Amino acid sequence: MKINTLEYVDDGGMNWHKRWFDSLNPSARTRVTTAIFRMQGGNLSNLRSVGKGVQEFRIRYGPGYRIYLARDGDTLIILLGGGTKARQQQDIERARRLWDEYKSRKRTEA
């Protein structure tokens, strides 16, 4: 099953996933790109819930990279941001806030 990914842009025009991704070194970018490619192919084995509909994809490399995302149906993943183990709680809180914003915006656009 093919799963599409979408980088969420918040109400202020900020794409937190892109901002984080662009800050990574080339090796880390490759690992993150590979992880997203695997998710698009249906490999969701490294996902774990961090509450309120947000999930974390753990990459066991370097400082413990994480990709924060939420699923909108069976075939769409919304990329909300990323981070490392060191900032995990702040990154989770931001991802939850962005997910709430995404759902609210989707309801008003429907």
Image: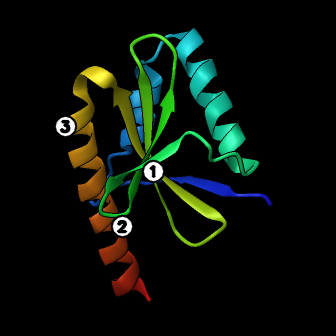
For the point 72% across and 51% down, the residue is 42
Please state, as top left, top right, bottom left or bottom right, where the N terminus lies in the image.
bottom right
Badge number at residue 95: none
| Residue labelled with disc 2 | 102
Instruction: Between label 1 and label 2, give the one nearer the viewer.
Output: 1
Q: Nearer the viewer, residue 78 or 73?
A: 73
Comes first in the chain, label 1 or label 2: 1
Mark 1 surroundings: few (<14), some (14-19) or many (≥20) residues within 10 A = many
**Which residue bears the numbered disc 1?**
69
Of the residues shown, which amino acid type is indicated by label 3?
Answer: Gln
Residue 50 on image: x %, y %: 33, 50
- Could you classify mark 2 by the number of other residues whose Cα lies within 10 Å: few (under 14), some (14-19), or many (20 or more)? some
Farthest right residue in view = 1
Q: Label 1 is placed on what type of residue?
A: Leu
According to the picture, the residue beneath numbered tag 3 turns out to be 90
Taking depth in this image into account, of 7 and 61 the one nearest to the observer is 61
SS type, badge 3 = helix
- Left or right of 14 in this view: 6: right
Q: Is residue 43 left or right of residue 23?
A: right
